[in-house]
Image: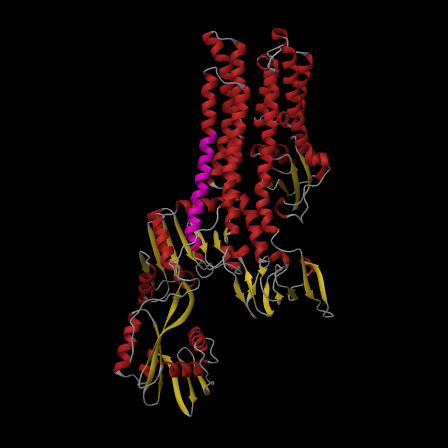
Amino acid sequence: MQKMVFRIRGMCCAQEIGLLKDRVGPLVGGELNLQFDLLAGKMTVVILGTTVTEEAIRQAVSSAGMEAVPWDDACPAGTCPVAGTFWQRRGPLVLCALSGLAMVAGIAIQTFFAGSLLDALAEGSPEEVGLHPLALASYGGAVLLGGWRIAPRALAAARALRPDMNLLMAVAVLGAMGIGEWLEAASVTFLFSLALLLESWSIGRARNAIKALIDISPLTARFLCPTDGDIEEAPVERVPVGATVLVRPGEKLPLDGVVTRGSTSIDQSSITGEPLPVAKGVGDEVYAGTINLEGSMEFRSTRPASDTTLARIIQMVEAAQSRRAPTEQFVERFARVYTPLMLGVACLIAVAPPLILGGNWASWLYQALVVLVIACPCSLVISTPVSIVAGLTTAARNGVLIKGGAYLEAPARLRAIAFDKTGTLTHGRPVVQQIVPLDDHTEEELLARAAALETHSTHPVAGAILRLADERGLSYTPAEHLTVLPGQGAQGVIDSRTYWIGSHRLLEEWGHETPEAHRIAEELENAGHSVVMMWTEDHVCGIMSLTDEIRFEAPAVVESLRSLGIERLILLTGDGERTGEAVAAATGVDRYQAELLPQDKVEVVVHLNEKYGRVAMVGDGINDAPALAASNLGIAMGAIGADAAIETADVALMSDDLTRLPWLIAHSRRTLAVIQQNIFFSLAVKILFLGMAAGGIATLWSAIAADMGASLLVIFNGLRLLGSGPGRVGDGRPEGHPQQMSGPKLSS
């Protein structure tokens, strides 16, 4: 298999893609072997079992009125400066400007010889009204200059029997000259070339939004050379994985890695959308494109430049452009039928009134030309992809990675959302909520001895106890003769006395439980807490309850989703019934289902889909992969740095910020609304002018002005999405303030 990639100069509308398929497709075994990226101006040719040269492909593109040049692989998303001469880069602008000047010159000349501007604008053919030869030459020059780029494409469309906007304009201009409307022919040509120029600018505007993502990461890095230890500065592509990279305050990080020296705070907003800096120290992960705000630091690179989190985000945004939204697909299918239909309507308007009603042939031919002008579907076709890419890029800038236009539209139509518990509504790590000392022990004494027994344990429960002891500044010495009881707890000697720490069940099995300890432990367990007991030979020292830390913003997010019209919010968890009930009560979801295996979650999602039609599953993207795949929209939480999460889900929330979920739904609805506005406005303008043409009152220049105005308005309306910032949902707590499940407040 051979693959060739080209930059296509002059490809600015979806209809030109169809023309390229007709011209290049037969050379390479069919149009299925062609891939197009309109906004990047890129064509990828996949050659399977056929022999075709690069020159043959370039000639085929040239016959379609465009130019193919080899693609530079170092320029992702088509964002490199356009290669070529000044004429190749600025020629369309020069020709359009000269066309406008020639038209204005023609009007000025005719005004001088006709005596007034009104008489000049009313001129018809030279024989009837006396169009001055110099004015005629100026109008002809305006047509020639403005139509220089249009004519080859119109000819190619005619040969391929695929009518497009260029062919419609060419027929309209030739018809206008044929009936002596030279000023109208010149104005139509100039305004259409101006519309094409502005359309190309709008595509470049959307393309630059993606380029902004690429510009985030620096091109070079300073690192310690592995061979001699000297500091070397080189392009990021040459920095080996495992090298120690040096970053000064205020600099951007060039690669992904793990901090090995120094502590600082990092602005990760370019990757995760988090508004506040994140503290980083030895052992913490850092990402390319983020900004080191404070101290100097060193980190060990963990990925090559081509595989950083930022690089993967850019690749996903690029790939997302090829996954077209349903609305975009509908518009393109509609345009393929609409354009030839309008040709038929124009022919009918030109012929039927003179034959049936005895109307003037020239007058109705003129109205038919107006129909051809207003029939141009480019404003309808181009506005949708511009809106989609603007929406995708804005989402990526705000830490929400969406894998395509289809998934950008999907959140707007959701009716139900299923949440995983661990790592989604909760942080996925236990925290100590209550300490209940017994038999004259104190909280500090109980916690210090528990930490002494758990010092060398890697269990999450041990981690929670050690974190709390450190937060309270307690000093403790690791227990002597420490013995780990796998799956149950540990025992050790503290101050010449043996202590045990473990589950409620272990205490019961060993026969050390007291009625009071049993009562307290049951109350805590009924509230959905995990219970850790500590005892010695002759008494129970105390009880600690632990819960998974619920995200502080979870209740407000659930309420926001409900206010957005989501009909059913359900919690799915593999934990026990009591834990599921407690988390559901704390977060406010409609219902919960507990003790679920992965296949059980899939069954629940399938059932929700049958009942509600549009269902999202929000999970960690790894353990919940089957349920994510079964849903209409899979959303991965906290996907930063997790390859599996990004690959599994349709949408990846790059930071652990649940507030991005209601923002995503609102952003999706706004994007869909903009697209629908564009479609409605484009069709409304065309219907209006079709009615005016049928009534014999439309003019060519007003039709092209209206069509150009419609194109500009829908394009600018789509580009408004680039300014869609993140909305934050909270419950009034400071950032990072934890929330645990509520439970009984107990004491000895």
- Give the quarter of the image for residue 310: bottom right
Q: Position of residue 500 (x, y in %)?
A: 38, 84
- The answer to which quarter of the image holds residue 537 is bottom left
Q: Is residue 653 left or right of residue 234?
A: left
| Closer to the camera in the image, 625 or 526 | 526
Q: How many marks?
A: 0
* Image position, residue 439 (x, y; %): 31, 86
At x 38%, y 59%, the residue is 732
Q: Which residues are magenta?
A: 659-682
Query: Which residue sits at x=64%, y=25%?
Result: 100
Front one among 185 and 642? 185
The quarter of the rendered structure image containing the C terminus is: bottom left
Between 415 and 263, the one lying in front of the other is 263
- Image height check: is 47 above or below 746? above
Q: Is residue 602 above or below residue 578?
A: above
Any part of residue 53 in sight? no
Residue 662 shown in magenta: yes
Q: Position of residue 724 (x, y in %)?
A: 48, 46
Main SS, magenta region, reads helix
Residue 536 location (% of width, % of height): 36, 88
Q: Nearer the viewer, residue 417 or 520?
A: 520
Residue at the image position 55 percent from the left and 62 percent from the top: 266
In the image, residue 618 lies in the stretch drawn in magenta = no
| 644 lies left or right of 600 | right
Q: How is the image coloured?
A: secondary structure
